[in-house]
Amino acid sequence: MKQMAVLSGKGGTGKTSVTAALATLAAKELRLVLVDSDVDAANLELVLSPALQTTNEFIGAKQAIINGDLCSGCGICHKVCRYDAIVPDEPYKVDDIRCEGCAACLYQCPNEAIRMESVAAGRWHRSDTRFGMLFHAYLYPDQETTGLLVSELRTQSQAWGNEHNTDLIMADGPPGIGCPVIATCTGMDLALIVTEPTVSGIHDLKRILATTDHFGVPALVCINKVDINPRRADEIRAFCEGWGTEVAVEIPFDRAVPEAMVSGIPVTEYGDGLASNAIGKLWQIVKQYIWRDDSQSREGKTR
């Protein structure tokens, strides 16, 4: 089973649109599992029309709980809390939103009135789509266990993939280079980086390539909306050449992409066009790259 992540370094490059379009092509040849790793703002489901199968609670970090019967009101916990999470009422209480789970109060309480309890930080779902099973999630507000929730999604998708003889796991990654991106890309066979010819696009392309290189993940670059700024597109090509990373495909600006999004379908199902044709070429390159070291041919593989 192979795994690939579609990353961007920043939001708004068209990463999810490319992922959904690639999924339509991959599902024609392979047994596919999809993962939406952007647990703060999951939107892959908007163009895949999934049918919900299961919902599971995600238990994140622990938070402090004060036993009012044992609390003497000494105020030590209030003094040692660096996050102002202790409310000096009668008895003392913990502000769930402010508590970071550091347990400083637990260790300082002379009456052993404080305990740490695991709390629900979000939920993850398994949904069926016409392209394969989709694993996606929702992180509750003010929770900071994004990377852990992404790791849970990857664990669940890999278990499902192994059980059902999946050929490829394709993850739609979050923007940026933080913990959820690291949790998404580590151990992947390929990181497909979708960028755009803008100042911020080039800046964040450099950051995400440095991230994938650091974790030893091979990368290909796709320049989306390549013709909106030819000079910046030239900068991306020059940078990728100097970095030693291949620009796999350049996707022209195509009004069919937003029209397909409004219709709630991937652009490759919307009809032939500039973007659809370019993404078709991209899938052939991605497929050859992922299985470049395999002796077994993937020709004729059906879902």
Image (cartoon, rainbow, N blue to C red):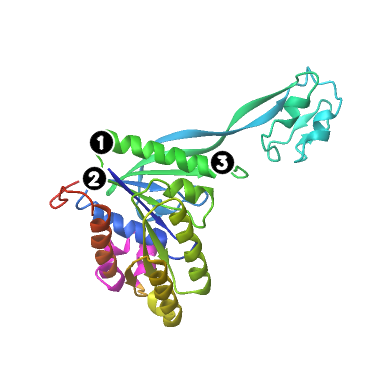
SS assignment at label 3: loop
Q: Where is 116 relative to 182, above or below? A: above
Q: Earlier in the sequence, mark 1 or mark 3?
A: 3
Q: Are marks 3 and 2 in contact (CB under 8 Å)?
A: no
> As shown in the figure, which amino acid type bears the numbered disc 3?
Thr
| Label 3 packing within 10 angstroms: few (<14), some (14-19), many (20+) | some
> As shown in the figure, which amino acid type bears the numbered disc 1?
His
Classify residue 51 by image quadrant. top left
Q: Which residue is mark 1?
A: 164
In-image side of 277 versus 96 (left or right): left
Q: Earlier in the sequence, mark 1 or mark 2?
A: 2
Q: CA distance from mark 1 to mark 2?
A: 9 Å
Q: CA distance from mark 1 to mark 3?
A: 29 Å
- Residue in the image at 66% along x and 31% along y: 63
What number is the disc on residue 155? none
Main SS, magenta residues:
helix
Q: Which residue is mark 3?
A: 145
Task: Report if residue 276 lies within the magenta region.
Answer: yes
Classify residue 31 by image quadrant. top left
| Residue 99 at x, y percent in the picture | 70, 37
Q: Where is 126 relative to 117, above or below? A: below
**Quadrant housing the N terminus:** top left
Q: Is residue 48 visible?
A: yes
